[in-house]
Amino acid sequence: MTIARSVLLRASRSAWLAEQFRQRAFARRAVRRFLPGEEMSAALGAAAEFGAAGLGSVLTCLGEQVRTPAEAAGVREHYLNLLVAVAARGLPAQISVKLTHLGLDVDREACLESVRALVVRAEETGSRVWLDMEEASYVDDTLALYRRIREDHERVGLCLQAYLTRTPADLESLLPLAPAIRLVKGAYREAPAIAYTRKSDIDRAFLQLAERLLDHSAAGAFPVLGTHDHRLIRSVGESAQARGVTAGAYEVHMLYGIRSALQRELAGSGTRVAVLISYGENWFPWYMRRIAERPANMWFVVRNLVP
Ligand SMILES: Cc1cc2nc3c(=O)[nH]c(=O)nc-3n(C[C@H](O)[C@H](O)[C@H](O)COP(=O)(O)OP(=O)(O)OC[C@H]3O[C@@H](n4cnc5c(N)ncnc54)[C@H](O)[C@@H]3O)c2cc1C
């Protein structure tokens, strides 16, 4: 991990910096590159545009590590309403949630019941709920919660991070559940004892995990490639072809505002693509992770210092 990335990821956890950034107009302007707006209506509007262009959407309201049951209940209500709004507009959209936003640190059972309520609403409205993966300390709880929900429900998917050395074993244990798995490289600051730090190691792990999922797609596993890495997407596409897996048997998900041309190009050539659209006021930690992925993004912040 580079020093810049490490510093940015440490900064992402500063409440003081978050407050400073949120109050500054230049920061609010810069963040608009990665989100269509802070309101749900902005996200729904963007999802409608993507839908018209043949791309799906995954909507997420930004926030994490809530501290009170009332906050967690508010987040659950927000997402329940979001699923209704998506259905009312007939959008090809799913949602993605962070368990700590739904109160994992406050009350695990209440968090489980909130996720269950969202998945039931997703079943009723023809959508799907994705569970984000947060820092490594949350992986065991996230896997346990996913397993409990998956016992009774299909419309739930789970994110796994290729940079964690434990992930191949986690995936093996999940394969009998015919899981929908969104593979990502991993966005947090993890110790080298538990996570690969070299890009080549992470990319190799990603490809191997994707191939393992493709091997099980006939048995119901559904791989989603959560990456903007066109080489990796191409390699997985070749692996799928070699296995006789059709293009519809997996999807590519990318973030709003990142490699938009590639999103449209892939969709145009028959790959199923969805764009993860984030919105909400609590964008600071998430935004810092986007800058850490590509420190050159800092220039957008600097450029926006001038109105
Ligand atoms: C749909 C989706 C869901 C995700 N969910 C999670 C999650 O739940 N948990 C988690 O830990 N991580 C999550 N991530 C983040 C992920 O772990 C990576 O940090 C992020 O996707 C960057 O890695 P990459 O795969 O795009 O590859 P990289 O090798 O980092 O990037 C490949 C290319 O994509 C472009 N690119 C990548 N990131 C940026 C950026 N920020 N700004 C501008 N260009 C960029 C650059 O051109 C770069 O060369 C998610 C990512 C996506 C796309």
Image (cartoon, rainbow, N blue to C red):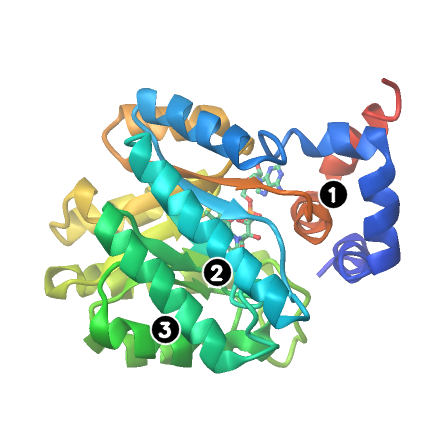
In the picture of the structure, the residue carrying the numbered disc 3 is: 146
Q: Position of residue 219 (x, y in %)?
A: 12, 66
The residue at label 3 has a CB less than 8 Å from ligand 1: no
Q: Nearer the viewer, residue 38 or 245?
A: 38
Residue 230 figure quarter: top left
Q: Helix, strand or loop at disc 2?
A: loop
The residue at label 1 has a CB less than 8 Å from ligand 1: no
In the picture of the structure, the residue carrying the numbered disc 1 is: 295
Badge 3 crowding class, 10 Å Cα cut-off, few under 14, some 14 to 19, many 20 or more, is many
Left or right, residue 99 beside residue 81: right
Quadrant, the N terminus: bottom right
Identify the amino acid type marked 1.
Pro
Whether the residues at callouts 3 and 2 have beta carbons within 8 Å, the answer is no
Of badges 1 and 3, the one in the foreground is: 3
Label at residue 19: none
Label 1 and label 3: CA atoms lie apart by 33 Å
Residue under the point 26% across and 58% down: 155
Badge 2 crowding class, 10 Å Cα cut-off, few under 14, some 14 to 19, many 20 or more, is some
Q: Position of residue 120 (x, y in %)?
A: 28, 60
Q: Helix, strand or loop at disc 3?
A: helix
Q: Position of residue 231 (x, y in %)?
A: 42, 42
Identify the amino acid type marked 3.
Tyr
Identify the amino acid type marked 2.
Asp
The residue at label 2 has a CB less than 8 Å from ligand 1: yes
Label at residue 132: 2
Which numbered disc flags the more N-terminal residue, 3 or 2? 2
Label 3 and label 2: CA atoms lie apart by 11 Å
Q: Helix, strand or loop at disc 1?
A: helix
